[in-house]
Image (cartoon, rainbow, N blue to C red):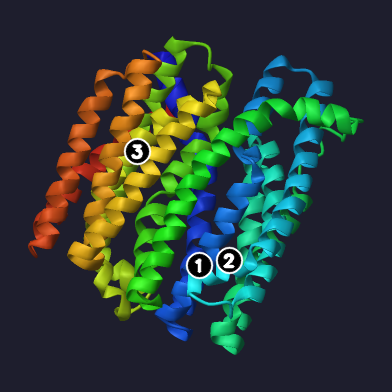
Amino acid sequence: MAKREGLSKIVLKAMGIFGGVQVLTILCSIIRTKLVALWIGPMGVGLFGIYNQALEMMNTATNLGVRNSSVRDISQAMEQRDATLISRVITVVRRWSLWLGLGGALLTMGMAPFLSRFSFGDYTHEWHFVALAIAVLFMALTNGEYAVLQGLSKLKRLAHVTVSGVIGGLLISIPLFYFLREDSVLPSIIAYALCVVVAAYLYKDREYPPAEVSPRETERMGAGFIKLGVYMTLGSFVGMLASYAFVSWLNLYSGTDSVGLYQAGYTLIVKYAGLVFTALGMEFYPRLSRVANSSRRIRVFVSQEINIAFMVLTPCLLAFILLRSQLVWLLYSEEFEEIITFITWGVVGTVMRAVSWCMAFVMLAKGDGKIFLITESISAVMGLSLNVVCYILWGIDGLGYAYIAWYVIYTIIVGVVYFKVYHLTLSGNCYRNLAATLVVCVMAVLAMQLGLWYLALIVFAVAAPFCLRQAYRLWVK
């Protein structure tokens, strides 16, 4: 018990470091999105969604998973405590990031006509996608530095990079939004990428100096994480492609305003509500990679991570449900009230996402690229199909129902791998906490949907203090 409490304290403290940064990042994103909604409107939010989806898709396609796969190699090199080996691995990671960034930028330029035609139905935005190639290069270089800092477990330095980049990007974007309005969307995206890459190089690790590694050695040493990264890239790219396909279909089927509504709701339930996952994962993935060959320790780590995720998520999700209308008004405007039902039911899907997210990291820690590709491909196809069908049947509200069904199916898929392929188990507390979290969230959702807000408030008043008290006890022990 003492060891598990110590582990919980480590996880919570790591989450506290990066969680605070995530909150500040979210606040900057809120300000930026609010200004876009007020000065440009749903059209501006829709354009942000289209260009960012294209940027993420191209970055995923050309980065070959180096951002995540190389963290595993750096973490394992740290375990050997060989400074020379660590320096060589870091040098290789940075070189591959540069090569892949240049290749990604050239590919984006070559695909600019196709991206314009696919996204807008014509070629009038071709040069916009050519310019987007600059951001692709910047993202690749930033991802390399992120991987180094995460693999070295230097979360404070990584936090400085994130905060500096986001604040710098916001300060540059504000005058662009005001003076250029709709024409400011693409320049602001490029400006943000520039600020982040500059911050990454200002705060990059200098403890391990660059090592002399020949091009042939760079290829050989990088073969391991590139091979795993290719599978990870294919799996992630399928997901990005499915998301991009849905946004493009929605743009053609219902218009850019509908894309803006979807993007606003998606951002709330996936990015804002999911900041807990990002904070936890920064410490969880390297730690899990170091014990990838120990089934007992994996079981302990995954079970503990799920329990902590529920402990932190439950009060956040209940507060999200209670303040849903106020959040939409604060973050966007009254024009976005249509997404209320979408984001309310999406919270229930977030509960299932917590379970699948923790178990899915085992595939990456073990380096099982093929299994990861299969599970992510099935998930992407199911997610796209559910989004299209549910939107046709129920409009924007249906996307909330689709999100629940999607993550129930994904949890089952990942569970088959975790339990049947790896023969791993979860502690009994995981099942009890899952059931409890689902019950309180569904109760709060139903109460709000029926207009019985005071019942949802009672659920929050009972559940939130209990979870926060448990987290505090683990923090101070």
- The three-letter code of the residue at mark 2 reads Phe
141 in relation to 5, above or below: below
The residue to which callout 1 is attached is 118
- Left/right of residue 101 with respect to residue 33 in the rendered view: right
Q: Going from the N terminus, do you reach mark 3 or mark 1 first? A: 1
The Cα–Cα distance between marks 2 and 1, rounded to whole angstroms, is 6 Å
From the top left corner, tell me how far across and down residue 287 is, in percent: 55, 25
Residue 82 shows up from this direction: yes
The residue to which callout 2 is attached is 114
- The three-letter code of the residue at mark 1 reads Phe
Secondary structure beneath disc 2?
helix
* Circles 3 and 1 in contact, beta carbons < 8 Å: no
- Left/right of residue 38 with respect to residue 18 in the rendered view: left
- For disc 2, the neighbor class at 10 Å (few under 14, some 14 to 19, many from 20) is some
Residue 314 shows up from this direction: no
Tell me what residue is drawn at x 39 percent, y 28 percent: 359
The Cα–Cα distance between marks 3 and 1, rounded to whole angstroms, is 33 Å
From the top left corner, tell me how far across and down residue 176 is, in percent: 62, 81
Residue 268: mark in rendering? none
Q: Which is more toward the observer, 50 or 125?
A: 125
